[in-house]
Image (cartoon, helix red, strand yellow):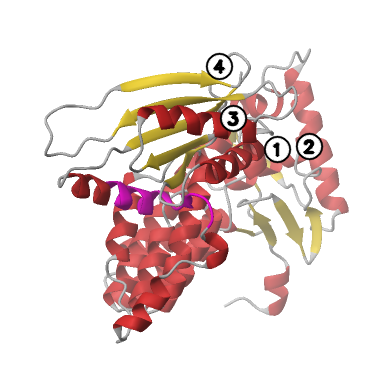
Amino acid sequence: MRTKGEEENILRVQMFGKFSMVWNNHTIIGNSKSGETQFAYLMQVLLHNRKRGVSRDRMEQILFGDRDVTDIHHAMRSVIYNAKKKLKAAGLPNVNYIEQRDGMFCWTEQIPVSEDAWEFEQAYEAAEKESDPESRLRLYMEGCYLYTGEFLGAQTGVLWAAQEARRYREIFCDCVEKAVSLLREVQDYPQMEKLGLYAAKLDPLADWETVMMEALVFQGRDEDAIKLYESTMELYFREQGLHPSDRLMELLNTLGTQIRHGYAGLDSIQTMLMEDEKEAEGGYICAYPVFQGIYHAVERIMDRGGQSVYLMLCTVVDSKGNPMKDGAALEELSQRLGEAIRCSVRRSDAITRYGKGQYLVLLINTTRENCNVIQKRINGRFLVGRQRTGISYHVNSVICRACEEGGSTWKDLSGI
């Protein structure tokens, strides 16, 4: 066990998220600018590889890359010389910080280093070897919380750092999945929820919301589970520009069926089911899974005949008629298109956002001619002044599965 003095005389290095070096509460490197210098690059690769060292060729490649340096060996020596001066000025003991052993550059063993990435990996490896479930869970949880962000997040363009970042992310994912499995076995759902939230913040759009969803459902927190369900759908539409992964959809829908309400009479249930008056005007905007459920229900209802239903895809396009897939203005245009659609269709029609700049509309009990009318209404509300963007429309008739004949497709480009 280290004494207080020994604890202080440790170089503390953070590799996850932003890079930092701290010696006896004195920050040597700690902000974004200081992390992008030759000194920082040297320290990053040297301290991370302190056990095995770094070859001269590799060090020169990392520090200078393809830069046209007249005497690269001299430049290398200068960087190391200046680094030693900086370390001494920061208060580190006056030793030979950067040694050469067997042709490799190595960090001195005289100054101990505490590196978060190394500690994370050690916790994970210890968990993998542990046979006792309780101890294994403790080590996996410790590992999960030691991972605080992408490895050298500011150095994603540097090959060695990018490779390590990918490797550590895979370890983190495995660590979370195994911790969740053990938490599920002991039914520790509060810890499971906390871990799911932590993982989702660190590694967004990676389906960790399913962990939170499961924990909420099994804690009986139905309202919170429903809110998470809806916010997750919106997040994936907004950030990815498409509906969530099949795995997320399957898990969320499966978990959604497990939500149970307390005993209530029919009148009370019907009151809760009724739509808020403020949201009752215009088309019904819903999350994609809800839209999918409505589509399935409409298909079944059509088995009994008598209704004509169309599915319309509305896509924001540029002045040349090409779909807009990115850009600062796309989110504003998408929101404006959604509002234009909502105000242009009937209350019985369902609307969902499918991707960036895309909406699906289920037009119930209408005709092909009315689809044209609806498109004109949407254009009238969406197009402003000399706006160069427009909307393309694709429409399919919805045919019940019992029918043998397929629906026809037609396309219309408007407002360009």
Q: How far is disc 3 from disc 1 in space, using C-alphas?
A: 54 Å
Residue 289 within the segment the image draws in magenta: yes
Q: Which residue is mark 2?
A: 37
Q: How far is disc 2 from disc 4 in space, using C-alphas?
A: 46 Å
Depth check, front residue: 154 or 34? 154
Mark 2 or mark 4: whose residue is earlier in sequence: 2
Q: Nearer the viewer, mark 3 or mark 1?
A: 3
Mark 4 or mark 1: whose residue is earlier in sequence: 1
Residue ID at (66%, 29%): 383
**Is there a contact, CB below 8 Å, between mark 2 and mark 4?**
no
> Which residues fall within the magenta stretch?
281-295
Is residue 274 shown left or right of residue 38? left
Does 292 sit above or below residue 193?
above
Q: Which residue is mark 4?
A: 321
Q: Which residue is mark 3?
A: 379
Crowding near pointer 2: few (<14 within 10 Å), some, many (20+)? few
Q: How far is disc 2 from disc 3 in space, using C-alphas?
A: 53 Å
Q: Position of residue 304 (x, y in %)?
A: 15, 47
Q: Amino acid at mark 3?
A: Asn
SS at circle 2: loop
- Say the numbered circle drawn on residue 41: 1
Q: How far is disc 1 from disc 2 in space, using C-alphas?
A: 6 Å
Residue 259 in view = yes
**Is there a contact, CB below 8 Å, between mark 3 and mark 4?**
no
Q: Amino acid at mark 2?
A: Thr
Q: Position of residue 202 (x, y in %)?
A: 55, 55
Q: Nearer the viewer, mark 2 or mark 4?
A: 4
Residue 138 in view = no
Q: Amino acid at mark 4?
A: Gly
